[in-house]
Image (spheres, grey):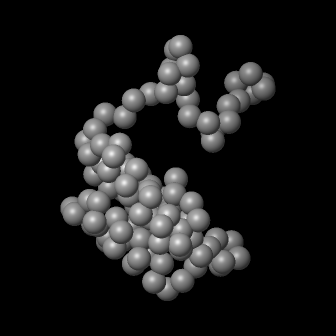
Amino acid sequence: MNDNTLRDLRKPRRLAGGRLPKITFPCDYPIKVVGDAAEDFAASVCQVVIRHDPAFDARAIEVVPSRHGRFQSVRLSIRATGESQLKALFVELKATGRVHMVI
């Protein structure tokens, strides 16, 4: 593989004309929430998520500790209904003060 075929996976793939692909709502939307490791971190994330997606099933989450155990990532999927729902969810997660990153 040469350098011309590699791309930075942190940057979204753009369509012709430099446009970003559109998300068609409603859809299943994967989210990863990263914060300091604690016994109740996943539960606090789920409490916020269920306010934005009442049908959310917390049994389907995956909690992954960091290599040294200082952080945890909670991987989940919600039924996204629109951009405003996603923005509100991300804002509320960050407002907890426990979340470092939402991807």
Residue at far left of view: 55
* Residue 85 seen anywhere in this rendered image of the structure: yes
Instruction: Name above or below for residue 73 compared with residue 10.
Output: below
Q: Which residue lies at the image location 49% right of the left edge and 27% below the top edge?
A: 20
Q: Quadrant of the N terminus?
A: top right
In the picture, residue 56 is in which quadrant? Answer: bottom left
Residue found farthest to the right: 3
Picture coordinates of residue 7 (x, y %)? 68, 31
Name the outermost residue toward the top: 17
- Vertical order, 85 against 72 (above or below): above
Q: Tell me the residue at 41%/71% (across/down).
A: 45
Above or below — where is 19 with respect to 77?
above
Classify residue 15 as left or right of residue 78.
right
Query: Residue 69 lies in what quarter of the image?
Result: bottom right
Residue sitting farthest toward the bottom:
39
Q: Going by the image, does 27 lie left or right of 68?
A: left
Residue in front for this viewpoint, 12 or 60: 12
Please name whichever residue, 47 or 42, is drawn nearer the observer in this view of the structure: 47
Report which quarter residue 58 is drawn in: bottom left
Task: State the image coordinates of residue 73 (x, y, percent, origin top left).
Answer: 54, 67
Report the residue at 61% width, 36% height from top.
11
